Image (cartoon, helix red, strand yellow):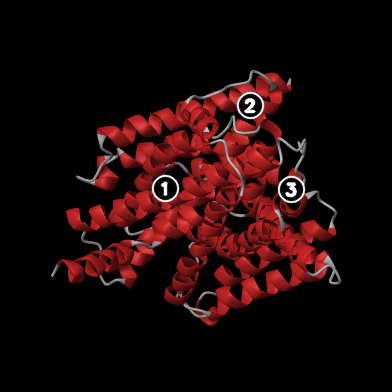
Amino acid sequence: MDKQASPNKLAAFFKKLGPGLITGASDDDPSGIATYSQAGAQFGLTTLWTSLLTFPLMAAVQGMCARIGLVTSQGLTVTLKMHYPRPVLYLMLLFSFPAITLNIGADIQGMGAVCHMIFPAIPVSVFCVLVTAIMMFIIIQYSYQKIAMILKWLCLSLLLYIIVPFMIKQDWAQVAKNTFIPTIQYNKDFFSIIVAILGTTISPYLFFWQTTMEAEDQQHNGKGIVVDKKILGDMKTDVNTGMLFSNMVMFFIILTAGSVLYPAGVREIDTVDQAAKALQPLAGKLTYLIFASGVLGTGLLAIPVLAGSQSYMLAETLGWSAGLDKKFAQAKPFYISIIVSLIVGLSLDFLGVSPIKALLYTAIAYGLTAPVMIVMIMHIGNNKKIMKEFTNSRLSNVLGALTLILMTAAAVAMIYFLF
């Protein structure tokens, strides 16, 4: 009986995983990998503690977004449009769109560069075009359910980053010390990387994606708009699992770069393929191939989320028919906006925009704009007119406020040291 119960419990657990797992996993995209690799290469193991800090903060904010999606049965953009002054919504879009477009471009470039590294005879630009074409085909051709299933399987690619550090000799006492005892350096470079880590981990586009996907998932599962304790409990399991997974991967990427690249004197990581290349002579070809394969898997996972979140925001603002379950003919403007965002992102490669600059500017832009979004999410989460009896718990409000304070303080410190 116990033997049968265990697989059944495991199956029931995996059935609960959906939007939260995909959102968490997509956060570790090629731009995130580059940021975490740069943190490890530049500062060794001294930023490992950030993963312990960001997990509860990320889980709290994404949990608020998920609850808003379940209770309102609509995206965050629609809620802002219905209940708040229009300038608030337009301000969110103004800050979010350039950062998301840069993020898409940086991820496409990162994937193209890694493919070129594995197959050097083919130029980076060819791979970039190929990646973009594959993304367009998948998003337009497949229904929401199929895309969600593909994305869930792609989450497995992140396990590669958990394996890598165990293939290298580690000083686990030093790892534990840097994980549980925070180290802070009072200079511009350190605060820039902290803002970049916070920005790439607690990203505004994930707020929009999580809210919309929870609403869509609710409709696809035939649960309607009735929210009860079981639905909220399943949502928490999904979100907490996704955010834990995301932060574990972040931890292991910083650990890999900090324990391999930093001691070897590699201090600058300009691209994700550079991070992989630097690993090859120091940690072996297998480690480098695993690292490179992870970049491709995470890119395929993250780009539909980035392009989709941007198009949902635009469609919900302008009142277009939107949804990944709709055919192209049923939601032409929605799908055209996805195609445009991918093409604009791709064009960054041909315009000669530096991938690492795009990545860092993206992460810093997220770090500067996220506090404003968190204020709005917390206000919505505590608004009884919108959320009825499902307003934020005290713990959610405390963690949300802490997220707001830390992200604001880090951004202010970075600006101070910058000027």
Circle 2 residue: 191
Mark sitting earlier along the chain (3/1) = 1
Q: Position of residue 182 (x, y in %)?
A: 51, 24
For residue 347, side relative to residue 173 (left or right): right
Specify the amino acid type for callout 1.
Leu
Give the structural element (helix, strand or loop) at label 1.
Answer: helix
Residue position for label 1: 244
Q: Choose between 294 and 45: the one closer to the eye.
A: 45
Sequence-first tag of 2 and 3: 2
Residues marked 3 and 1 touching at CB (< 8 Å) = no
Q: Which is closer to the viewer, label 3 or label 1?
A: 3
Q: Amino acid at mark 2?
A: Phe
Name the residue located 21 percent from the left edge and 61 percent from the top edge.
226
> Is residue 37 something one can see in this rendering?
yes
Seen in the picture, residue 275 relative to 268 is either above or below; the reply is: below
Judged from the image, the secondary structure of the residue bearing numbered disc 3 is: helix
Residue carrying label 3: 282
How far separated are the C-alphas under marks 2 and 3? 28 Å
In front: label 2 or label 1: 1
| Label 1 Cα crowd, 10 Å radius (few <14 / some 14-19 / many 20+) | many
- Asked which secondary structure carries label 2, the reply is helix
Rendered location of residue 132, percent (x, y): 69, 69
Amino acid type, residue under disc 3 in the picture: Leu
Identify the disc placed on residue 333.
none
Q: Position of residue 82 (x, y in %)?
A: 39, 50
- Taking the spot 85% from the left edge, 53% from the top edge, the residue there is 352
